[in-house]
Amino acid sequence: MENARISGWQFFLLSLNFIVGTAFFVRPGSIIAVSKQDGWIVPLIAGIFAVLIACLWLTLASRNPGLSIVQICTKVAGKYFGGFIALLYIWFFIQLAGWVTRNLGDFMKTILMPRTPISVFHLMFLIVVCYAVIKGVETIARTIEFLAPLVVLIVVVIYLFTLSEWKWERFEPMFQVSTWQLIKDSLPVIGFPYMEAVTLMMLVPYVKSRVKTGLLLGITVATLLISGIVFVTIGVLGVTRTSHFAYPLYIIVQELQIAEFIEHVESTIVIVWLIWIFIKLCISYHCAVTGICQLFRVSDRTWIAIPLVLFISGIAILTHENIVDNIAVDTRYIFQYTSLYGIVLPVLLLFLTWIRRFRKGESGGSA
Amino acid sequence: MSDHIQSHSESPLFTNSESDVFVQQLVNEIGNPPDLKYLALELRPGILGSYLFIETLVDKNKIEDNVLKFLSESRLLDVSESVSDLMETLKSRIPVASISKVFDLISCAQGLLKGMCLLVIPGADHVLMLDVAKSHHRTVTEPKTETTVQGPNEAFNEDLLTSIGLIRQRILTADLRFEQMKIGKSTETKVWICYIQDLASDEILNEFRIRIRSIKADSILDSTYVEEWIQDKTFTPFPTLMKTERPDVLASHLLEGRVAVVVDGTPFTLIGPVTFMQFFTSPEDYYQRADIATFLLWIRFLAYLFAVFVPSLYIAASLYHHSLLPPTLLVSLSAQREGVPFPSYVEAFLMMVLFEMLREAGLRMPRISGQAIAIVGALVLGEAAVQAGLVSAATVIVVAVTAIANFVTPFYNFGISQRFLQYAYMILAGFMGMFGILCGVLFTVIHLASIKSFGVPYLAPIAPTFLSDWKDVILRVPRPWMKTLPRMNKPKRKKR
Amino acid sequence: MKGQPIIQHGKRFLIVIIFILSFGLTGCWDLVEVNRLAIVNFVGLDRNPVDGKFTVYYQVINPTGVAAQKTSGIKSPIYTYRIEANTSTDIANKIFDIIPRQPFFDHYSAMIVSERTARAGMKEILEFMEKQRDRRATVTLFVTDDPLSDIMKTYIPLERLPGHAVGSINESESMQSGRAGKQSRVKDLVENMESAAFTVLPFVRVSGKVMPNTDRYEEIDANQGNIVLQGGAVFKQDRMVGELTLDEMPWFYLLNGKIGVFNQSLILDKAHVGVQATRTSVRKQLTMSSGRPILKINIESKLQIVENTQGEKLTVQNLAKIKKQYNRQISDKAYEFYEKAKRNQWDLLGIEQQIMLKRGKQWKDAKKDKEIWHQTKLDLTVKCTVDMVGITIDPY
């Protein structure tokens, strides 16, 4: 394992950007399409559940201090069964990287460069990410620390300008959807992006202080950001148009006119999103590589990281045929699928940890 | 001053019986150069000594006024003294500040080559070496590369001792420390490490010592030779050591807990650890009002961004993302390009390379013909090429903006990094537009984040964040507010 | 760091460089030089409601004709291309039959549709536009009942790009006189496509005879062959249902609270006083009382006197009179406008839409009754203050 340290602040930024990452752009459209004017409540509900789930992960981590989730698997569940679970997690991280990559490709191809083959975007971006992964988690953390304020600044400035299109009438009628329905609607949101944050449990051993604050605060701020952006989208673009667009945020910015000569600033938002995708991809990629290294006791990350470029870009192309496919999978299965990694397996591991400790205590007592 | 005894074990020793033979050997050892003077000297009747020096290295006045005059004085003629007593008398009484005894041939040869005068007296068991070296150095002049309008205007020169003197004059604390090392088999260059003992972190200082000691070079002719051995990363366009020829800059860095390396024979000194953002500060910042200095600092950031991004964004916008350009600009660009033969990225590359050549030509040329280059560059390239429809006016403007922005960076070696990025991004923009540039930028940021300068992350104080250090890097707050030392250098004291 | 042999660094560096250079072997698919673009500035669209055939006009900018410094002999700033096709997809094909460069739609500044197209419903067209990545929905949409070819094939003076010209007219009208509104973009129409609210788009015509020759730039009479704003086209959802005259337009924007500056000429004892309402705030509230909706509209204006033909001095009492007259005149005309709209079955105040958005028991029945907005009582309160009187105080 690499000898690296992440500060609490860096871990906060990591978790915040990991969660906000792709969700910031992909989520508002689907949330508003389902929950209409009350869409902004959905992320809040999902966020509350996410905090609870994160507490579960943190308990698991604190019972096994200094270990990443892959190491916990092999430690508590034995070499073979634990190895199998660990493999599942590694597969999940790789898959996550694949999804994120595909999101990037879809976006670039739909919006900016329709004639360029999608795998070119994938490969180019993955190579950059691979470089970051080879450089290690400290470098990734510092890169994010450098980029995050920039991104937040651009987003805030752009959305302040969009407020000229704001209409409160777009929120009427409010509070139409029942609470139960809202909770049901928030399930996919819990699945993506919150449950994916289980990936961060790979980074916990590097964090020397304030793990809990970092993760929980990260989730909270991310929730507020996502809810905020749904709110802004409703107010600026309206429910009718939002629910028809694949990337409503892009449309908002596209239609923004700051001054007579500053229109068409959509490229800035493309930059922001690419940076966010980059951050999320870096983390999931790094976790996949470290997971493999830890499971098979490989010491040099480089030779694991490089082949994964091709593997992930392959997965990215195979994940779905188009966005419609993606949305269908997202609404129907995402919660069930991610809860395997986010809830079921952690609970199982926690249970096994508890059994182990119980046995140990018993044998220690008898001896 | 120096009374140390030098000896080389393998070389033939000086023996009192065969002084002529020894001298002959010595002359052969250095190849009997035409500027070697070898003169006989009668100390007292019967004792015929000789003195040797290399004419081009010594100050003849010193030999005449101090040595020869003294030797010809009558009180040395006291016959009762033995030869060894005579040597002692000479050593203690010749009015030359630095006299040492040498015993073997190699040391004698080295002494000669350093500009010493050797006094060989038969019957003695050693040779006296008198320091009468003449230094061939400029006087202290104005800095060449880091000029300022206000503030001190002295620069180091090639003489190490002058340079050290300039530092000592500025920092009077007893905690100012120097350590000397001699590096380079052929050059034996003196390399001094300077630091302030109660500020500089031991960790960083040790790193400096270890790295300098591990240099295995035959020659050190400039501080860049040292830099290339001790820098953190070899393959990077970004310098991890700051180079300065200004004693005031060096002093200010020492006082913030950094470590400096002074190399004999060059006015450029090295300072480390430094981070990316520090390369934007000019000494001028500290010699004028804080608010204006902050403004100028930001202008420099902006210029760096301009220099790096303007050509690539121009290529990206005019080839891929036409919607980025305002409609009127798009129309006028389109009109300008009507009938231009090359695609715009080729055009931009061509102009950029031409500009680089122009600049290189300007650097190496005698000053007088500089104007000619300026006229040819401005008129032929700028005016005629556009008139003839070879390049579009927009490209010329872009190149001009980039060129101006290129010159804003206060540090020459850092300025080169922006040229490197410029071209890299231009290539990427030509192939993939904004996406290409963004990949390039991300790559650069990762690269920057992965570099450390003597243990300090290169992107500090932004990543990792040291908020208290921002006051001197992103802003330039008024002096009274700068109460704490930069934390990123891990100084031993917190307060100034 | 120093611990590792430098040669390994070098190899890694080389690999990275080769990777970076291999990016270069990809790419270039989307590369288009600026001068390979046909920059579309103005689009005209006509669809025959009978056979569904499209006739599309593209006004493409001729860069050398527009750019400032060039001295080439070509004077025409634009060329108009006409394409006839059966479907929107077909248009995309046929564009390349005639336009030698790659059409570039990102920057077109206005779009115009013929009246018959608008009356037949524009859903299909709007859908197509919204799907394209390079077409912005912020483009102003115009309607005309003149033959489209007349509009698209006339050079107009001063602002040489007709697309810019009509856009600017719409913009300045919305700011200076209230006779047009900024909310006449494609996106406004799309937003109201699923609601009961009405949209009003500017209506234009060609004045005088068509000028299809650049000689017209030497012609002094700017009224000949110019595009002139004529009024507004009323849209319900995606369908045009009627027309508003230019004089009625401010009332629509006033009652919807979207007005900027507008002018009123007040009759006071046979003399008239011209006032300009510089800032008007409008508050609307829809309530239900005994089964009948009441729309309360509160209008507060800041006035500036621009013309005064009264014989008397401008005193506080006189000003009070002016204010009173203003209040009366505004509410009279507003009622009149509302009644006219109701006669035409146009719910221009968006009452039906507001009822749909209301919650609560008393609105439940109202929501079922599609025609209830007809019975809505308009309750207008107008207030004003005069804060500027112009440079002269008393009339001569």
Image (cartoon, helix red, strand yellow):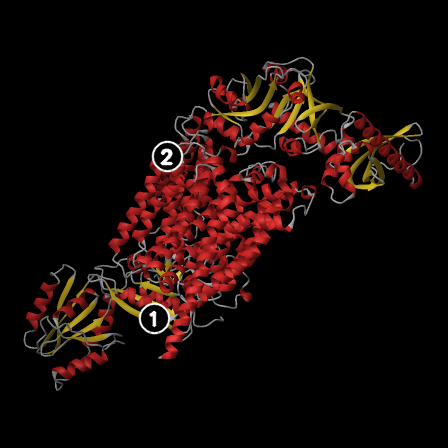
Residue C43 as seen in the image, left or right of residue B121 = right
- Mark 2, Cα crowd under 10 Å, few <14 / some 14-19 / many 20+, is some
Q: Position of residue C110 (x, y in %)?
A: 61, 27
- Mark 1, Cα crowd under 10 Å, few <14 / some 14-19 / many 20+, is some
Residue C33 as seen in the image, left or right of residue A176 = left
Q: Nearer the viewer, residue A355 or B113?
A: A355
Q: How many marks?
A: 2
- The answer to whether residue C374 of the structure is visible from this angle is yes
Q: Position of residue C80 (x, y in %)?
A: 56, 18
Q: Quadrant of the C terminus of chain C?
A: top right
Callout 2: residue from which chain?
B
Q: Secondary structure at mark 1?
A: strand
- The answer to whether residue B273 of the structure is visible from this angle is no
Compared with B46, B182 (above or below) is above
Q: Position of residue B441 (x, y in %)?
A: 42, 46
Q: Quadrant of the N terminus of chain C?
A: bottom left
Q: Nearer the viewer, residue C211 or C204?
A: C204
Reading the chain from its start, which is encountered first: label 2 or label 1?
Answer: 1
Distance from disc 2 to disc 1, alpha carbons, whole Å, reads 50 Å
Compared with A261, A339 (above or below) is below
- Residue labelled with disc 1: B178
Of badges 2 and 1, nearer the viewer stands 2
- Residue labelled with disc 2: B350
Give the residue drawn at x 13%, y 59%. B33
